[in-house]
Every structure is written in C-alpha cells, then in structure tokens.
Image: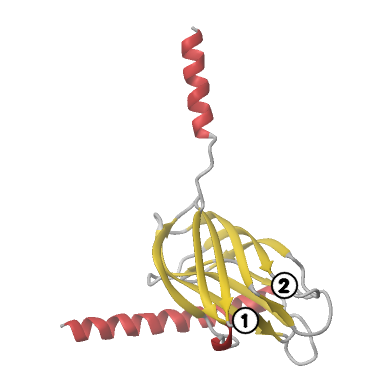
Amino acid sequence: MKPLLFAVAAVASLAAVPTAAAVITASLDANAMQINQLNNVAITPVSLGVGDALDLTINFTNGPMTVGNGSALWIGLLTNGDGATLNSTATMFVLGGSANMFGSLNNTQDNSFAHVGNFFGGFQTGSGDLSFAGLRQTLTINSSDLQGPREYDRAFFFFSELPQGGVVPEPQSWAMLIAGFGLVGAAARRRRSGAARAIAA
C-alpha cells in the first residue's frame, strides 16, 4: 500500500509543477523609436497558447529611451496570423527607470489583436520626461478563442504620450487606439509576405 501512495503523491507533485515561461530578450534602438507605432524586431518564433507563460525583456541600445511624460507603455509579441481575443494577466517592470516612474505595474486585460502582451498607462509619479533602459513583462495567457497555440515572430514596443491638457485616456480609449495600430501592422505584414511570395514565384 505504501508504494501505491508514494506513486500517487509523485504524480500529484508532477502535476503541480508550473509550465516554464518562454524567455525572450530583444533589443531596439532608442534613437529609432517612433511614437504611436509598433516598433518591432524579428525574434526566433515561439508558440504560445492558453496556460503558457511569457517572460519578455526589451532593452534599448543608444539609450536610455526617453518619452515626454508618457502615459502608455506597451511591449509584446506579434504574429503573422489573424487577430484573436486573448485574456492575459501581466506585470510590467521598468528597468533602469528615472526617479519619477513606478518600478512595476500589473493588470489583467482582454486583447483582441494579432499580438500577445498587455499595455500599461500611469507609470509616471511626477512631472518631467520619463527615461528607462528597458522594459520587462511577465504574463500568463488565461483564455483564448483560438483552438490551439499561436506562433509569434516579432517583439514590439509602443508608446504614446499624454494628449494636450495631460488627461489620461480611459482604458477603452487606449484599446480602440491600439486596435487601429494592430490592424495597420497586420495589414503591412500581409503585404510584405504577399510580395515575398510574388518574388519567389
């Protein structure tokens, strides 16, 4: 009886071990970053689905990266596939940030675009420009309307500054804004892949 109990305990122990996170580190040139754009770089493709975890770090070369009182910072991964609704819980860490920034923020979001990665507003704790050497986001995908995992092949960074008057938009407004950029990015990727197929033919 004791060996059987031991075997059951061993199986339960193995089942409790969390899935290891996909760890990705990418670099972007701080001098080349454009506001309200999905600034991105190619990565080794990674497949992620429900229950999977991601640990993404983007470091800025020729930095630090400086934004004028930025109210939204966003990093994540892009796919060449179609958009899908994902729900993910994430924490964003500021690496080497200026004194007027929070060190980290966390949230849970529904994202209905061709990407994985949560966006964050409200990192500023005071006036003046914000500067940082890098950003790190750890997240877990809670749910998805896809049937299985999706492959991601680019890492991106997005930032948007406060509008005139310094009023921070509601999360729904950010979602609509970012949805537009996501659709533009997806269309551009499709055009590039179509052109590549035409040249190959």
Task: From the image, tell me which residue sits under label 2.
Answer: 97
* Residue appearing at x 66%, y 79% in the figure: 173
Mark 2 is surrounded, within 10 Å at the Cα level, by few (under 14), some (14 to 19) or many (20 or more) other residues, namely some
For the residue pair 11 and 30, the one nearer the viewer reads as: 30
Q: Which mark is residue 63?
A: 1
Q: Position of residue 190 (x, y in %)?
A: 35, 80
Q: Position of residue 61 (x, y in %)?
A: 56, 79
Snapshot quadrant of residue 106: bottom right
Viewport quadrant of the C terminus: bottom left
Q: Position of residue 60 (x, y in %)?
A: 58, 77
Q: Position of residue 57 (x, y in %)?
A: 56, 65
| Vertical comparison of 141 with 170: above or below | above
| Vertical comparison of 114 with 86: above or below | below
For the residue pair 87 and 71, the one nearer the viewer reads as: 71
Locate residue 152 relative to residue 99 in the image: left or right: left
> Which residue appears farthest toward the top when viewing the image?
1
Snapshot quadrant of residue 67: bottom right
- Of mark 2 and mark 1, the one earlier in the sequence is 1
**Cβ–Cβ below 8 Å for labels 2 and 1?**
no
Mark 1 is surrounded, within 10 Å at the Cα level, by few (under 14), some (14 to 19) or many (20 or more) other residues, namely some
What's the residue type where badge 2 is placed?
Gly
Snapshot quadrant of residue 71: bottom right
